[in-house]
Image (spheres, grey):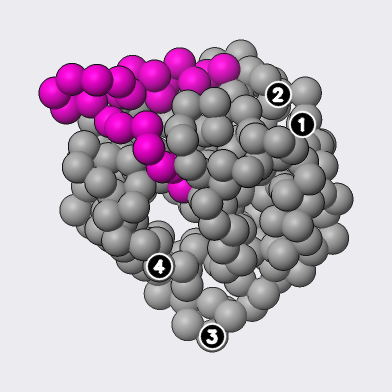
Amino acid sequence: MGDITEGETSFYSNAEGYWREVPPTVDGMLGGYGSISSIDINGSKAFLKKFLGEGEGKTGTGCALDCGAGIGRITKRLLLPLFKTVDLVDVTEEFLDKAKTYLGEEGKRVGKYHCSGLQDFVPESGRYDVIWIQWVIGHLTDDHLVDFLRRSQKALRPNGLLIIKDNVSYEGVVPDEVDSSVCRDLEILHTLVGRAGLRIVHEEQQIDFPKEIYQVHTLALR
């Protein structure tokens, strides 16, 4: 993955083309698995609450960034209830437009909407307590993922956290031609996190998802 050159352009443009055709709904965001949204959010909330609060080493609740935010499913149900302000970044303009209505009254606490692929996105330095990166790293090449994680570190406040929640394969890298993404195994993901100069402070597998989909793991990084 990391050594794509010519193919890199089509890897990204094919993914953008795929998402442009996806309806801006929760079901669309979850590839037809809208029914798992509550299980997903509840798992994420329990995971995140381990780190938030007052006291030494705790992560603040001022501002979060939702990466690959889509229409704001995670912003609405996970991040806005816990943080004063949330920013969204997504490659698809239509999703961000939809987010403005989908988020309703609470959407007034959204700071910024960024329309960008993560391979090009530079988060503002020192702005975020938590950067939440869910179901989007498969759209980045290895090198771009490492670079994005490095840029994200600079965007964190003291005691800030990067959180990756994503599918993991059983072995190696599994390409998905449909949405132009890849699924990596945990060992590869750990290696890339290390290359970015981050350490894993906590890791869990999401439980109660349908048997036929990939395992999903959540990693908290500092």
Q: Which residue occupies 34% across, 52% down?
A: 127
Q: Which amino acid does label 3 sit on?
A: Glu
Disc nearer the start of the sequence (4/2): 2
How far across and how far down the image is residue 192, in percent? 31, 53
- Neighbour tally class for label 3: few under 14, some 14-19, many 20 plus, Cα within 10 Å: few
How far across and how far down the image is residue 31, in percent? 76, 41
Task: Provide the residue span drawn in magenta.
Answer: 42-65
Disc nearer the start of the sequence (3/4): 3
Q: Which-is-in-front pick, marks 4 and 2?
A: 4
Q: Which-is-in-front pick, marks 4 and 1?
A: 4
Does the residue at mark 1 contact the one at mark 2 (Cβ under 8 Å)?
A: yes
In the depicted view, which residue is nearer to us: 122 or 148? Answer: 122
Q: According to the image, label 2 marks what residue? A: 36
**What is the spatial separation of the Cα atoms under label 1 and label 2, in whole angstroms?**
6 Å
Q: Can residue 217 be seen in this view?
A: no
Q: Which-is-in-front pick, marks 3 and 4?
A: 4
Picture disc at residue 33: 1
Instruction: Give the total of numbered labels.
Output: 4
**What is the spatial separation of the Cα atoms under label 4 and label 2, in whole angstroms?**
31 Å
Queried whether the magenta region covers residue 57, the answer comes back as: yes
Asked whether, in this view, residue 154 is left or right of residue 116, the answer is left
In the depicted view, which residue is nearer to us: 55 or 147? Answer: 55
**What is the spatial separation of the Cα atoms under label 3 and label 1, in whole angstroms?**
33 Å
Q: According to the image, label 4 marks what residue? A: 122
Q: According to the image, label 3 marks what residue? A: 6
Q: In the picture, residue 13 is in which quadrant?
A: bottom right
